[in-house]
Amino acid sequence: MSQPEFLPIQWKSTFLSLLDQRALPGKKEFLQIHTVEDTIDAIRDMAVRGAPAIAITGIFGLTLGAKKKSGNIIPEEIDSLINQVFESRPTAVNLSFALQEAKKRVGEETDWESIAKIWESFALEMMVDDLKANQALGQNGAELFPKDQNQIHIITHCNTGALATAGHGTALGVIRSLRDQGKKVVVYADETRPFLQGSRLTAFEMLEEGIECYIITDGMSGWLMNHRKIDAVLVGCDRVAANGDTANKIGTYNLAIVAHEHNVPFYVCATKDSFDLNLKTGDEIPIEMRKESEVTQFDFLKTADGKYLLPEGKTSPIGARALNPSFDITKAKFIKNFITEMGCFVPGEILVRLKSV
């Protein structure tokens, strides 16, 4: 199974090295993260993003926090450390599950040095498990496409590749697996406003991999499905409720409706940690609201010397207000299959599949 040449999360024993996704595609720049506070800033400011990558980074952040302490622990300090990391990105359930497991693994330990080792081991374990899960997911997803079909056209949304995971990716992992089978895959990457994860990051990964890719604006999918044969829509997710309602990057719901209208299969790629059986429907999933400036200006519209190409990078009149929900909920009825490391199944099978894991 091929892997991308870049690893976005690299543990260096005393610090964490993160590929700064805000700098892409302009340059590959790594941040050196030495404290839990730096970790929280990196997650909140989207230097690292993607639900699996956030969870792994969060546990490394706990490790760094524990390494800065000494002596015996106070339980309240553990809770405080975990809560700080959780608040950095509350919608993605992977982080919540990882933090719950990190607290459980403290067990009867009483000193910070031992806890730091436990959390370090857990984070490294998560990286290995996530990579294996993504590879299995990719292979399972590839089986949904006819074996005798040599060219496949896919629309993606946001970024669901190696940058968002420990490697290989979820939705982009399926695309990599199809490519590895010798198929020609043509990707249409939604730009994914307002942070442009599609045009900046998915297109970057596809270029790195030599996979044909065309960037489209978020409003072009209807035109594309009318004028070109689209075989599937592949997206990732940040949380799935027990009934199959799915939270993913804002714009996913619109894409699902358009795909449904055009009879294009809409697949959600998710590892088991993205399913939250504690929530009955998507109405219970918390939606993160981000800062207005992400909508009203392009922080990336700068010249090489750091000057904005537009006044202060503004794309809107000064004083204009904006709404910026980071995610939306796609109803289960629009989802043809979930593609997971456990296999592919319809939304109605979630409880049976997950309770057996």
Image (cartoon, rainbow, N blue to C red):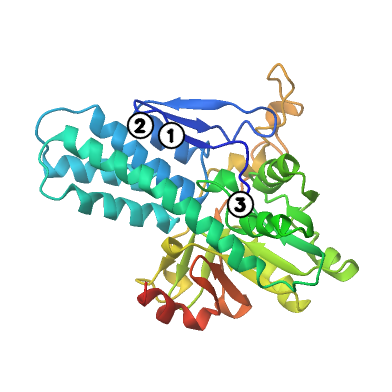
Of residue 332 and residue 145, the one placed in the foreground of this image is 145
Q: Amino acid at mark 3?
A: Met
The quadrant in which residue 154 appears is: bottom right
Instruction: Tell me, yes or no, whether the two marked residues, 1 and 2, touch with CB atoms within 8 Å.
Output: yes
Label located before the other in sequence (3 or 1): 3
Element under label 1? helix
Instruction: Tell me, yes or no, whether the two marked residues, 2 and 3, touch with CB atoms within 8 Å.
Output: no
Location of mark 3 (residue): 1
Of residue 208 and residue 79, the one placed in the foreground of this image is 208
Locate residue 289, reporting x and y percent: 50, 51
Of residue 286 and residue 46, the one placed in the foreground of this image is 46
The quadrant in which residue 3 appears is: top right
Label 2, label 3: how many angstroms apart (C-alpha)? 36 Å
Q: Amino acid at mark 1?
A: Asp
- Tell me the crowding category of disc 3: few under 14, some 14 to 19, or many 20 or more residues within 10 angstroms, Cα based: few
Q: Amino acid at mark 2?
A: Glu
